[in-house]
Image (tube, grey):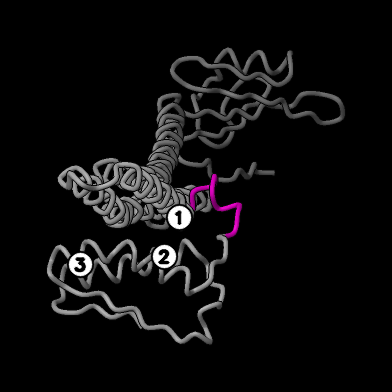
């Protein structure tokens, strides 16, 4: 029967040889090469010879070799396909590496940009801009740091605002008793007939009032050392009497009168002494500085 062989793939050759190593069908050298000859006796042979990759397989019938099937392909074409496969694989690796680098850079940028913004905000605060605040990002951990940073700046701003407010108030409220103390001492110094002991007692009383003023300013400012105690209560009548004593002299020096009018039904009403005295001093000081004529406290 004629031998029927499938068409060899690509550039390969496929042939059948008889025991005398003659080509009986297919393609290949007309006389079998050594690889085909060895297959008759040694079984399946695979070798690289003569620039080809050759495989020879014996064909048996009734336990007797009756021929050999020889398949060969040019080694160069195989290496070309291998190199193309390696090149394709390398291209895939390079593409994957490029994608990984782009993703990593984008991720790094998403982490670094909020931190850089937080650093700029911190620098602005260090330069004196207490209104600067850290913006949020899409990273939960960095957002937590930004919120903590903003809360810290808010508390510092509040602390500085209170300190500045305290300084302004203290300078205003301490100036009044100091002025009264100075005027009393100057009057006693220039009046040769004045009793020095009375002037000293008045100065002592004014210095005690100055001490009370300092304590009250600190208490109102929230100083821990003085906020623990509540302000002591004093009758309204006594407070107005002391206010009249303190402010009669300074207003008289300006040629102005001070009238105090109080309903006797409320003269014994108890109010926070130091706080109310501070309010009275501020109002009377403003009346002296910015008003004219008689000053009336009702």
User: Which mark is on residue 291?
Assistant: none
Q: Is residue 272 visible?
A: yes
Q: Which residue is more in the foreground, 236 or 136?
A: 236
Disc 3 or 1, which lies upstream in sequence?
Answer: 1
Disc 1, disc 2: CB below 8 Å? yes
Q: Which residue is more in the foreground, 179 or 216?
A: 179
Residue at (24%, 48%) from the top-left corner?
Answer: 194
- Secondary structure at numbered mark 1: helix
Task: Provide the residue designation for mark 2.
Answer: 277
51 sits left or right of 8 in the view:
left
User: Which mark is on residue 216?
Assistant: 1
**Number of other residues with Cα within 10 Å of mark 1, as a class: few under 14, some 14 to 19, many 20 or more:** many
**Number of other residues with Cα within 10 Å of mark 3, as a class: few under 14, some 14 to 19, many 20 or more:** many
How far, Cα to Cα, is label 1 from label 2?
10 Å
- Secondary structure at numbered mark 3: helix
Q: Which residue is more in the foreground, 88 or 187?
A: 187
Q: Which quadrant of the view contains residue 127?
A: top left
**Number of other residues with Cα within 10 Å of mark 2, as a class: few under 14, some 14 to 19, many 20 or more:** many
74 sits left or right of 59 in the view:
left
Q: Position of residue 20 (x, y in %)?
A: 64, 19
Disc 3, disc 1: CB below 8 Å? no
Q: Which residues are magenta?
A: 221-230
How far, Cα to Cα, is label 3 from label 1?
24 Å
22 sits left or right of 134 in the view:
right
Q: Which residue is more in the foreground, 136 or 23?
A: 136
Q: Position of residue 15 (x, y in %)?
A: 57, 32
Position of the N terminus, as image quadrant, is top right
- Seen in the picture, residue 249 relative to 111 is either above or below; the reply is below
Task: Provide the residue designation for mark 3.
Answer: 251
Front label number (2 vs 3):
3
Front label number (1 vs 2):
2
Residue at (16%, 76%) from the top-left corner?
Answer: 291
């Amino acid at each position: 029967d004629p031998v029927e062989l499938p068409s060899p793939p690509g550039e390969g050759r496929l042939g059948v040889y008889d025991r005398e190593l003659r080509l009986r069908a297919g393609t290949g050298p007309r006389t079998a090469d050594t690889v085909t000859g060895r297959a008759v006796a040694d079984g399946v042979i695979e070798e690289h010879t003569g620039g080809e990759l050759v495989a020879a397989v014996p064909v048996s019938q009734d336990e007797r070799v009756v021929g050999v099937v020889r398949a060969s392909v040019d080694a160069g074409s195989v290496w070309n396909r291998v190199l193309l496969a390696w090149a394709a694989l390398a291209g895939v690796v390079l593409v994957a590496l490029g994608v990984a680098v782009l993703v990593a850079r984008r991720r790094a940028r998403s982490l670094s940009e909020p931190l850089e913004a937080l650093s700029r905000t911190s620098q602005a605060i260090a330069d004196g801009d207490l209104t600067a605040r850290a913006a949020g990002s899409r990273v939960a951990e960095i957002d937590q740091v930004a919120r903590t940073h903003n809360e810290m700046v808010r508390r510092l701003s509040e602390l500085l605002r209170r300190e500045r407010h305290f300084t302004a108030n203290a300078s205003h409220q301490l100036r009044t008793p100091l002025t009264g103390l100075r005027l009393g001492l100057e009057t006693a110094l220039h009046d040769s007939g004045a009793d020095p002991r009375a002037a000293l007692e008045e100065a002592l009383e004014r210095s005690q009032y100055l001490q009370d003023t300092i304590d009250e300013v600190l208490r109102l400012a929230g100083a821990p050392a003085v906020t623990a105690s509540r302000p002591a209560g004093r009758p309204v009548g006594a407070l107005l009497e002391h206010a009249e004593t303190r402010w009669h002299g300074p207003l008289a020096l300006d040629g102005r009168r001070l009238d105090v009018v109080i309903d006797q039904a409320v003269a014994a009403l108890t109010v926070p002494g130091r706080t109310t005295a501070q309010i009275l001093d501020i109002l009377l000081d403003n009346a002296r500085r910015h008003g004219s004529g008689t000053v009336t406290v009702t």
